[in-house]
Amino acid sequence: MKSSSVVVHCKPVILESDMIREGHLYYTHNTKTGEIDVWVDDVPYEIMDGVYQDPDEQLCEHYGIDYDHVNCIELA
């Protein structure tokens, strides 16, 4: 399976997260929109314990990104 990159468009408050402050995630600041764009590799979707979870939420959980601060996610 080929890995693909994903951009997670976040509210600026995401800069306060530990994953960003500690340098574990690569991000850029989109000055046109004011958003913080976090660039990560996509992860395969998995059903855990037979329960459906939104794939975008699962991606954010994998990388420690607070889903409440996400505006949208798209392939890069």
Image (cartoon, helix red, strand yellow):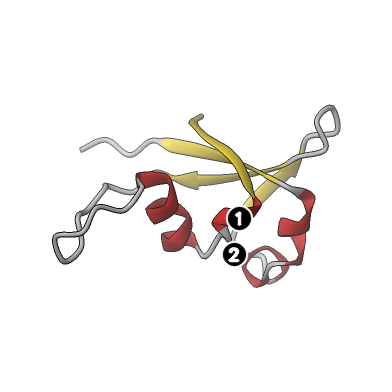
Tell me the crowding category of disc 2: few under 14, some 14 to 19, or many 20 or more residues within 10 angstroms, Cα based. few
Amino acid at the residue labelled 2: His
For the image shown, how many numbered marks are present on the structure?
Answer: 2
Which mark identifies residue 24?
2
| Tag 2–tag 1 contact (CB < 8 Å) | no
Rendered view: 67 above or below 38? below
Dividing the picture into quadrants, the one containing residue 48 is: bottom left
Amino acid at the residue labelled 1: Asp
Toward the front, the furthest residue is 51
Q: Position of residue 8 (x, y in %)?
A: 57, 42
Mark 1 element type: helix
Which mark identifies residue 39?
none
How far, Cα to Cα, is label 2 from label 1?
19 Å
Relative depth, front residue between 18 and 41: 18
Mark 2 element type: loop
Is residue 62 found left or right of 14 in the rendered image?
Answer: left
| Label 1 sits on residue | 68
Residue displayed at 67% across by 63% down:
20
Q: Position of residue 12 (x, y in %)?
A: 78, 50
Observer-side mark, 2 or 1, equals 1
